[in-house]
Image: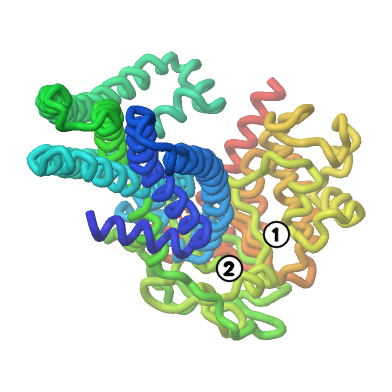
């Protein structure tokens, strides 16, 4: 527990030191104001009860009590304000740092099962969790201060009452820490199941999967899976909650017994004239306060379980290895060199690329062909520097691809991937994001749209280039899969990079539009290099060199004409595809 608390405070020092200190100071002042007010109330009652004994100092306790009450109102106000600014400071300090870290860290962590929990935790509003945890810790400290300063009042009655109260409250804290540990362990075990639950929840609520499930009438099955998983998570949570509740009840019973004994002692002493009225009222009046504090303490201590994980995840994330961009710049006219590259994904044993070598200079086009799973996209990922090769080297202009600085990388590559097509922002932003320097340059955006055969799009939309995509904004529109791919290509056309990396950029485009697109794309990449992955081999024919991958190895290499002439895997695939299209055409004619 001490280590966890240290972790939390370390993060607070990093993200919001001033606000954290302010919050702690006001919380402690607010906690001290309660016993102080109780003590002054006692003096006031005693002063009133003994009013006839002389006027000197009569108003003192009243003035002091009024001042304490007024100060406690002010402290309460400042505490609430510092609570708000603490949350705000954490949101501003923590969230951008996490995003920066995710951008800088080794991409391989996204594939690692052991990093999955950390990434899951930091994706769930960690600033809120950190703020909640810190505030809960401070509240617990403030409650402890309040309890022990109140118990000092009871020491005046008898050491036995004061000691018994201290022991009871200490036991409450120990029980709270114990159930907190149990909840923490439970949440640790639950994380993977919660990830699965979130995935199933997405399946049942997101537009695309809902349509699929509806069509296949399989929503019931997925719902059943979700219910079963949710039940198993809930069962354990209920078991531990009930156990904590039993301990809490035992604490309450002991507290009630203590209160009953206190009542007897108070009444007995008062009747025997051994207790002033003010002390009697204060000690009696503080009992409900103690029960309330006990309940709050128990609640706060057991409610921190989940947030510990977020704090641990934030610390672990900060330790994830970063890939620092090299200061070294790529050559003026860079060349891509794959030198005997073999690769297996982190955490896996199987090599998905074996001894792959090729070079590519600006002005040349390389197409990667091969069956699904043969390693084409992996070549693109290594080129982008997302992973380091297991063996061999990938360099661009003499610099290791994984060591390129972000600026250097964007000068070298412009990419279109099939699975990141469009964002829910305006059409102009969707295209302009290809070159943020020209994000608002309408002329360049229109030019890029023209290059991707989409020049008519803006005019056909209700707000032209400013039309938002998706339904996050009022008036947003949905584009077809093919239109979105054209738009993603337009985004790539904004860039003036040395190489265009196109990984299945036209999978959703019809064959006629595809061939038109590649023809106009030929003018975009003139003088530049391009690496092209396409299932439709007709588009590979425009490349200067085609690499045919088979099980991660280069099975064939050459121009379209040479490969067709030589026969083998490429010609086989090409002829199969052509006969398929011819068959489609004939079926269409018939
Ligand atoms: P292609 O683009 O030719 O269809 P990929 O390069 O995407 O093939 O995949 C090559 C192999 O690598 C496949 O067997 C695939 O299962 C595996 N693979 C792809 N991505 C990962 C990953 N993140 N982790 C582990 N294996 C992966």
Task: Judge left or right: residue 486 versus residue 239.
Answer: right
Question: What residue is at 83 percent from the left and 43 percent from the top?
Answer: 454
Q: Is mark 2 within 8 Å of ligand 1?
A: no
Query: Residue 257: x and y, percent?
Result: 10, 25
Q: Nearer the viewer, residue 389 or 44?
A: 44
Task: Judge left or right: residue 41 versus residue 367.
Answer: left
According to the image, label 2 marks what residue? 558
Mark 2: secondary structure: strand
Quarter containing the N terminus: bottom left
Q: Nearer the viewer, residue 60 or 525?
A: 60
| Displayed quadrant of residue 247 | top left
- Pointer 1 local density, CA inside 10 Å: few below 14, some 14–19, many at least 20: some
User: Up-down: is 548 above or below 152?
Assistant: below
Question: What residue is at 21 percent from the left and 28 percent from the top?
Answer: 241
| Displayed quadrant of residue 576 | top right
Q: How is the image coloured?
A: rainbow
Query: Residue 433: x and y, percent?
Result: 73, 54
Distance between mark 1 and mark 2 Cα atoms: 12 Å
Q: Nearer the viewer, residue 75 or 310?
A: 75
User: Up-down: is 329 above or below 480?
Assistant: below
Q: Residue pushed farthest left?
A: 160
Query: Residue 282: x and y, percent?
Result: 29, 31
Task: Judge left or right: residue 127 versus residue 167.
Answer: right
* Residue contact at pointers 1 and 2, CB within 8 angstroms: no
Mark 1 vs mark 2: which is more N-terminal?
A: 1
Question: What residue is at 47 percent from the left and 39 percent from the top?
Answer: 59
Labelled disc at residue 43: none
- Pointer 2 local density, CA inside 10 Å: few below 14, some 14–19, many at least 20: some
According to the image, label 1 marks what residue? 542
């Amino acid at each position: 527990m001490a280590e966890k608390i240290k972790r939390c405070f370390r993060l607070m020092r990093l993200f919001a030191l001033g606000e954290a200190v302010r919050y702690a100071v006001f919380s402690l002042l607010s906690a001290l104001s309660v016993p102080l007010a109780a003590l002054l109330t006692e003096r006031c009652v005693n002063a009133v009860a003994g009013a006839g004994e002389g006027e000197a100092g009569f108003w003192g306790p009243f003035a002091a009590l009024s001042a304490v009450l007024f100060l406690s109102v002010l402290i309460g106000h400042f505490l609430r304000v510092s609570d708000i600014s603490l949350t705000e400071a954490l949101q501003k300090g923590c969230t951008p740092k996490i995003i920066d870290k995710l951008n800088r860290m080794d991409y391989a962590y996204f594939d690692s099962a052991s990093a999955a929990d950390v990434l899951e935790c930091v994706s769930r509003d960690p600033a809120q969790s950190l703020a909640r945890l810190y505030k809960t810790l401070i509240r617990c400290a403030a409650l402890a201060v309040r309890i022990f300063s109140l118990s000092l009042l009871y020491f005046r009655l008898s050491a036995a009452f004061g000691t018994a109260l201290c022991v009871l409250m200490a036991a409450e804290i120990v029980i709270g820490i114990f159930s907190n540990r149990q909840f923490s362990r439970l949440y640790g075990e639950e994380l993977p199941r919660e990830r699965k639950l979130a995935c199933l929840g997405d399946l049942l609520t997101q537009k695309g999967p809902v349509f699929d499930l509806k069509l296949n009438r399989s929503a019931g099955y997925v719902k059943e899976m979700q219910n079963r998983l949710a039940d198993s998570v809930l069962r354990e949570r209920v078991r531990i909650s009930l156990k904590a509740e039993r301990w809490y009840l035992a604490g309450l019973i002991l507290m009630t017994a203590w209160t009953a004994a206190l009542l007897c002692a108070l009444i007995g002493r008062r009747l025997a004239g051994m207790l002033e009225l003010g002390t009697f009222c204060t000690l009696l009046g503080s009992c409900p306060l103690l029960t309330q504090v006990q309940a709050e303490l128990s609640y706060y201590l057991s409610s921190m379980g989940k947030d510990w994980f977020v704090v641990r995840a934030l610390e672990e994330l900060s330790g994830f290895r970063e890939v620092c961009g090299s200061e070294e710049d790529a050559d003026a006219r860079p060349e891509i060199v794959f030198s005997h590259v073999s690769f297996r994904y982190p955490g896996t044993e199987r090599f998905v690329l074996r001894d792959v070598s090729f070079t590519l200079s600006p002005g040349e086009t390389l197409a990667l062909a091969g069956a699904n799973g043969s390693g084409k996209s992996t070549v693109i990922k290594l080129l982008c520097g997302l992973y380091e090769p297991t063996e061999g080297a990938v360099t661009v202009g003499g610099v290791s691809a994984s060591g390129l600085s972000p600026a250097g990388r964007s000068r070298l590559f412009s990419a279109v991937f099939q699975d990141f097509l469009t964002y829910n922002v305006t059409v102009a932003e969707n295209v302009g994001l290809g070159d943020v320097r020209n994000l608002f340059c309408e002329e360049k955006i229109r030019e890029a749209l023209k290059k991707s055969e989409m020049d008519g799009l803006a005019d056909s939309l209700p707000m032209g280039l400013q039309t938002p995509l998706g339904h996050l904004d009022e008036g947003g529109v949905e584009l077809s899969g093919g239109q979105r791919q054209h738009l993603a290509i337009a985004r790539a056309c904004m860039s003036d990079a040395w190489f265009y990396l196109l990984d299945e950029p036209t999978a959703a485009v019809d064959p006629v539009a595809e061939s038109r697109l590649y023809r106009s794309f030929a003018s975009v990449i003139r003088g530049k290099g391009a690496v092209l992955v396409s299932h439709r081999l007709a588009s590979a024919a425009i490349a200067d060199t085609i690499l045919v991958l088979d099980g991660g190895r280069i099975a064939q290499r050459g121009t379209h004409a040479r490969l067709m002439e030589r026969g083998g895997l490429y010609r086989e695939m090409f002829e199969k595809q052509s006969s398929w299209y011819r068959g489609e055409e004939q079926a269409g004619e018939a």
